[in-house]
Amino acid sequence: MRITVPAGGVGAARFLRGLKAEVPGAEITVIGNTGDDITLFGLHVSPDLDTVMYTLGGGIDEEQGWGRAGDSRTVLSELAAYGAGPGWFGLGDLDIATHLHRTSMLSAGLPLSAVTTVLCQRWQPGVRLLPMTDDRVETHVVLASDEGERRAGVGTERGGGTSMVHFQEWWVRMGAQVPATGFVFAGAEQASPAPGVLEAIAEADVILMPPSNPVVSIGTILAVSGIAEAMRAKTVVGVSPIIGGAPVRGMADKCLAALGVAASAAGVAAHYGPGLLDGWLVDEQDKAAADAPELAGITVRAVPLYMSSPAATAAIARAALDLALELHG
Ligand code: GDP
Ligand code: CA
């Protein structure tokens, strides 16, 4: 069986671990979000690709959800001693080796997709991990006002009442506490899907959407030209990242608010729409979503959605796959 999964970071990686355990024989292709990528100290950092790679490869810091287990911060503290910033982005020493290797291969002219394949030769994630594109796409956040920026102690990039910052600066440095009014996926329209991405969608039996951030993880992937269109032709089942009106972790509610989308299981499904989504898993406490008129055309099923243990996570993956296979016919 061929399963293709568009993926952000932590939510996706944990879901994928459950899916692998539940369907060991499946050929799983992961289309990773690269809108969160950022250049730090000259190094190309791909947080979402690495979270998937480390989690499935057994190297993840389980508690944190990202980065390497047992990592240290010697390099970062040496940089701080030079006054070299930014100081707000955590980079462990072990993790830096990945970024050094990635950056040197990119500098030698390899595309990110080929670089990711090389990195995965070490980690053996057991899935084919593809970046959504080899082109540069960067998620920027439109902030409500200069005032918001001043409160956060951030310099203003341009005046006139709005300003933009890199997604990581908003998410990590500001903790998403400065209200956003929109997101710009810079470069997405001009970007081409990476080699193998459209094929993996077209040839998939089903597409499963993990409980990733609908705006800055899945939304970015869908913004790359051709990807959303290819997915609409397939059977797509998604897992809600929102339970009981709040994200299970992170600040997806702040992202949804910027788009005027309700932070609810039904709100997210309506945002994706019946053109894209065939089936939608919601948590048992959100089972009323099944009767929401705005979800007409989407088959909603309520199951426990907390990925609280390997068994619970595998059961979520099984429920998503079963629904997809039923709808696929
Ligand atoms: P990020 O790139 O690291 O932020 O990771 P993702 O975009 O892949 O996933 C983030 C989303 O995962 C958040 O919106 C969370 O609400 C969601 N999430 C995390 N843990 C769980 C869980 O146990 N169950 C569900 N349903 N969603 C979860
Ligand atoms: Ca991310």
Image: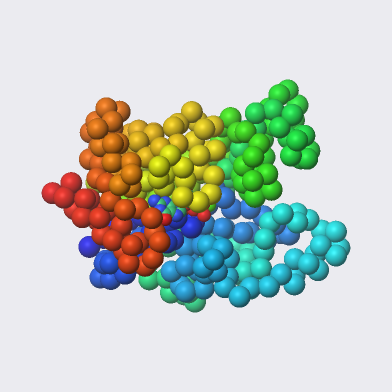
Q: Is residue 151 above or below residue 76?
A: above
- Which quarter of the image is occupied by the N terminus? bottom left
Q: Quadrant of residue 89?
A: bottom right
* Residue at the farthest front position: 285
Q: Work out whether 189 lies above or below 328.
A: above
Q: Residue at 46% across / 42% down in the picture?
A: 246
Say if residue 300 shows up in the picture.
Answer: yes
Residue 20 is left or right of residue 39, and the answer is: left
Percent position of residue 190, x then y: 51, 40
Residue 234 image-quadrant placement:
top left
The residue positioned farthest toward the right in the image shown:
82
Residue depicted at 19% across the width and 53% down the height? 325
Q: Which residue is farthest top? A: 160
Q: Is residue 118 visible?
A: no
Residue 9 appears left or right of 151? left
Which residue corresponds to the image point at 54% horizontal and 66% vertical from the top-left? 63
Q: Position of residue 232 (x, y in %)?
A: 29, 40
Nearer to us in this view, 248 or 256: 248
Visual colour scheme: rainbow
How many labels, in total? 0
Residue found at the very far left of the displayed protein: 329
- Indicate the position of residue 305 as horizontal and vertical percent values: 35, 53
Q: Position of residue 110 (x, y in %)?
A: 55, 63
